[in-house]
Image (cartoon, rainbow, N blue to C red):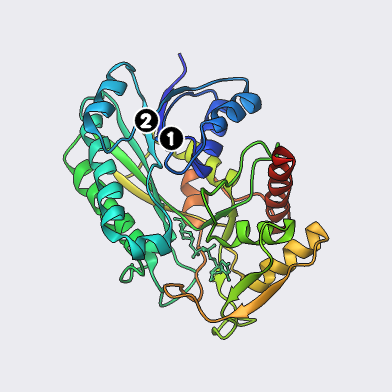
């Protein structure tokens, strides 16, 4: 009997890639997604890639009655992966209440639902943004978190604390996964990052500029204390992130966790600047990017990348895909989208 995993936000960017890897690893997957930042056609793409069409519930988990009604029809859930949240850093600054209400209530409802499950295993989608502007890099899971740079980051910090308090008193376990910068797309180019509206993340901005959806792009600041003056991030292939979720679910279901709440950094361990990303893209795509240096973007940290030793040791996981391979997968995805729209 296959282990059953409930995935909230399973039609989203990281969610859909994780669903594919879960199915490929023999799990039965149930998806909940309200399509607020995803597309129902992604379900078709998941089926094309895996030959399996997961059970899908179109509902907003902030509606507790809907959530309980849906999950009561699905017994023996072995683990829950909670992706569903708003994640646009800039938007969270403009609309903090929308972010606190959605990101906190959705988690609280998941916990209420989990109280009715016989197995209480939760993998929670957290973020490197909880580190704020770190005093030293690379950051490891013991690096003190700094004041959040945005309401988005603060919702992730608060949710981590909610998880710690909830699991302290129950017979269950939780894994907090702090993503660095997920980029790229599945090798089939059938799923990828598909922002509703204009993206703010670097890689979709790069590929949309290259394909002509945008005239030019801005590099937000070249006066930081970094190798070339532009910001440093840890860009990691979304499939490597997805595989880490499978490792985390297997660890919980096997009862191999060492504490009731464990935290792991999901990064490559390499810091890359914005200008280095542009160089990588131009190299792998053969396209010349039209960009300008612009003033710094409020809320940006100058440099952050992960110390990934703990995830490597405990999850038996490393990010396998190179930067160029990852950037090329994002370009192939953009080309696929253009082909679909023609
Ligand atoms: C990266 C760098 C920008 C756009 C991300 C996610 C967030 C969270 C944390 C998961 C920055 C620069 C960008 C552009 C640019 N991830 N940039 N021109 O801010 O690190 O946040 O990681 O929870 O959800 O968004 O990612 O891609 O927006 O920016 O120069 O047009 O690229 O200034 O230095 P960020 P990003």
In the foreground, 68 or 136: 68
Q: Residue at x 19, y 36 (%)?
A: 170
Q: Quadrant of residue 243?
A: top right
Position of 207 relative to 84 (above/below): below
In the foreground, 17 or 120: 17
In percent of width and height, residue 278 lies at 70, 67
Q: CA distance from mark 1 to mark 2?
A: 7 Å
Ligand 1 under 8 Å from disc 2 Cβ: no
Can residue 153 be spotted in the picture? no
- N-terminal label among 1 and 2: 2
Q: Tell me how many marks there are.
A: 2
Q: Quadrant of residue 213?
A: bottom right
Query: Residue lying farthest left?
Result: 169
Q: Quadrant of residue 207?
A: bottom right
SS for tag 1? helix
Q: Which residue is mark 2?
A: 79
Position of 143 relative to 268 (above/below): below
Q: Residue at x 21, y 25 (%)?
A: 116
Q: From the viewer's perspective, is 202 left or right of 340?
A: left
Q: From the viewer's perspective, is 41 left or right of 334?
A: left
Position of 94 relative to 4 (above/below): below
> In which quadrant will I find the C terminus?
top right
Can residue 274 be spotted in the picture? yes
Instruction: For the residues labelled 1 and 2, say whether their Cβ atoms are less than 8 Å apart.
Output: yes
In percent of width and height, residue 87 lies at 41, 54
Q: From the viewer's perspective, is 266 left or right of 285?
A: left
Dot 2: few (<14), some (14–19), or many (≥20) neighbours within 10 Å? many
Q: Residue at x 40, y 28 (%)?
A: 58
In percent of width and height, residue 245 lies at 48, 40
Q: Which residue is mark 1?
A: 249
Query: Residue lying farthest right?
Result: 286
């Amino acid at each position: 009997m296959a282990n059953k995993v409930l995935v909230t936000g399973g039609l989203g960017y990281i969610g859909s890639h994780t669903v594919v890897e879960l199915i490929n690893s023999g799990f039965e997957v149930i998806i909940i997604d309200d399509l607020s930042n995803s597309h129902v056609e992604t379900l078709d793409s998941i089926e094309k890639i895996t030959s399996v069409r997961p059970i899908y519930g179109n509902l907003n988990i902030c509606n507790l009655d809907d959530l309980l009604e849906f999950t009561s029809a699905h017994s023996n859930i072995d683990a829950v992966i909670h992706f569903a949240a708003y994640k646009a850093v800039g938007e969270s600054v403009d609309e903090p209440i929308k972010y606190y209400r959605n990101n906190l209530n959705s988690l609280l409802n998941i916990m209420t639902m989990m109280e009715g499950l016989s197995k209480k295993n939760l993998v929670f989608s957290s973020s490197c943004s909880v580190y704020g502007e770190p005093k030293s890099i690379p950051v490891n899971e013991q690096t003190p978190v700094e004041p959040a740079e945005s309401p988005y980051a603060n919702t992730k910090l608060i949710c981590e604390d909610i998880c710690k308090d909830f699991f302290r008193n129950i017979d269950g376990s939780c894994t907090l996964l702090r993503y660095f910068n997920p980029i790229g797309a599945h090798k089939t180019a059938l799923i990828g990052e598909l922002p509703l509206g204009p993206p703010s993340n670097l890689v979709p901005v790069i590929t949309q500029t290259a394909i002509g959806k945008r005239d030019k792009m801005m590099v937000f600041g070249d006066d930081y204390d970094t190798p070339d003056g532009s910001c440093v991030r840890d860009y990691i292939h979304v499939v490597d992130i997805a595989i880490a979720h499978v490792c985390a679910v297997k660890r919980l279901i096997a009862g191999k966790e060492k504490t009731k709440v464990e935290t792991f950094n999901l990064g490559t361990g390499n810091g890359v600047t914005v200008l280095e990303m542009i160089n990588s893209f131009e190299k792998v795509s053969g396209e010349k990017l039209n960009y300008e240096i612009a003033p710094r973007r409020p809320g940006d940290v100058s440099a952050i990348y992960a110390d990934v030793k703990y995830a490597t040791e405990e999850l038996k996981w490393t990010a396998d895909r190179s930067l160029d391979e990852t950037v090329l997968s994002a370009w192939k995805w953009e080309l696929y989208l253009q082909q679909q729209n023609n």
